[in-house]
Each structure stands twice: as C-alpha cells, then as structure tokens.
Image (cartoon, rainbow, N blue to C red):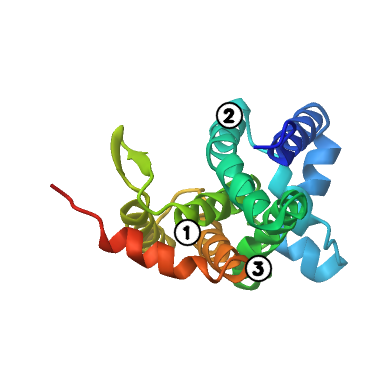
Amino acid sequence: MPTFAFTYILIAINILMSVLAWNNANFMQKWIFHPVSIARNGDYWRFLTSGFIHADGMHLFFNMFALFSFGLNVEFNLVLHYGELGRYLLIIIYVLAIVASDLPSYFKYKKDMYYSALGASGAVSAMIFASIYFAPLSKISLYFIPIPGFIFGILYLVYCSYMVKNAKDNIGHDAHFYGSVFGFFSALLLYPTGVDSFITQIGSFKPF
C-alpha cells in the first residue's frame, strides 16, 4: 500500500463535511439529498454533497470504519494493476458511486417533498463489493460471524432487494443495493482479466 493512501482523503472529507453540516443547519439543508429540490431547482450538487454528510456521529463512524476496512483493499488492488493512477481511479469510483446509488431514489421520489437522504452508504457499499470482486473469499463479519465475501455479497443484495420493497424505515436500501452493484461492475470493468481469478477462487471454496 502506498505511504499515503487516498482512502484517507475520502475519510477526511467525510468527517469535515459532516462536522460542518452538524454545526450549520444551512449547510445541512443545502447539501442533503432532496430529489424535489433537484428536480425543481436544479440543485444537482446534492447528488454529490449528500454522500459526504451524515446524520450523527454513529452514522459517520460505521460508514468510515467500513470505508477504511474495504477502501484500502480496493486502493491496493487498483494501484497494483494501474500504478499511481489507481489512487485516482479509487476517487472516481467513489464519487460516481454516490451519484449512481442516488439516481434510482431520485426518479422514485422526485415528487415527494418529504423525502431526503444523506450518508456515504452507497459509495461505501461500492467499496465493499469492489473488494469482494478482488478477493471473494476474504472474510466479512455478519453479526460477528465471519463468512466469505461472495456469500456475504449474495445475502446483502437479497436483503437490500427485500427491504427496498418492504421496509418502512429511514434507511436508503436503494442506495445500498445500487451502490453495491455499481462497485462490483466498476472493479470488473477496470480489471476484466480478474474474472477468471474471481471464478476460480469461488470454485475452490470448501464450506467444511
């Protein structure tokens, strides 16, 4: 891993923007993802800024812990295959994942005045699934039980798909699902020859 990973820059920006939003209600209202404001007023920056602010410290902590855990692995693999360009590719994937994960919710809620969302979950989900592409057998804890990444990925997508249709909570399950899909296929697009390794690793998996 490079001496200074760009993953740390993403974490720093998330912390800085979240703290600013917590201490300034105007920033929070201007940066949050609000589809109606985008559709009516052209506030397109919300697609991006909403992915760097969080509701509270716990929300920020869990997203940044996941970003630290998986972003560094994705960055390592991108640098391994692209050299220093890999660091910038990480930033590009992360930023595009924020927008891609918000687009379905935008079209779904662009007439709903009361819908809003915030947080890096869509982009972090992209990092998790890009990491799964590079190392599908690496363990990921599910309720403190370590399971192979590719199994976690399947369960996660099934869960998100179910919750998109049935959940009554305030969690952006749409963003989680589409961010995950975007992250996996971004990694595949950038390293297509890794498909063989991905399949081989899964094929070698022995549950017992």
Q: Nearer the viewer, residue 4 or 66?
A: 4
Q: Position of residue 136 (x, y in %)?
A: 39, 54
User: Upstream in the sequence, badge 1 or badge 3?
Assistant: 3
Q: Nearer the observer, disc 1 or disc 3?
A: 1
Say what secondary structure mark 3 lies in: helix
User: Upstream in the sequence, badge 1 or badge 2?
Assistant: 2
Q: Residues within 10 Å of mark 2 (few under 14, many from 20)?
A: few
Judge whether residue 165 can be spotted in this image.
Answer: no
Say what secondary structure mark 2 lies in: helix
> Which amino acid, by three-letter code, is at mark 2?
Phe
Q: Residues within 10 Å of mark 1 (few under 14, many from 20)?
A: many
Left or right: 79 as drawn, with respect to 58: right
Pointer 3: what residue?
103
Tell me how far mark 1 sits from mark 2, CA to CA: 25 Å
- Can you say whether 35 is above or below 31 in the image? below
> Residue shown at 66%/47% (left/top)?
118
Quick check: marks 1 and 3 in contact, CB under 8 Å? no
Judge whether residue 54 can be spotted in this image.
Answer: yes
> Which amino acid, by three-letter code, is at mark 1?
Tyr
- Can you say whether 132 is above or below 35 in the image? above
Q: Nearer the viewer, residue 22 or 96?
A: 96
Pointer 1: what residue?
133
Q: Position of residue 150 (x, y in %)?
A: 36, 56
Q: Quadrant of residue 102?
A: bottom right
Left or right: 189 as drawn, with respect to 96: left
Q: Nearer the observer, disc 3 or disc 2?
A: 2
Q: Nearer the viewer, residue 41 or 177?
A: 177
User: Upstream in the sequence, badge 3 or badge 2?
Assistant: 2
Quick check: marks 3 and 2 in contact, CB under 8 Å? no
> Which amino acid, by three-letter code, is at mark 3?
Leu
Pointer 2: what residue?
61
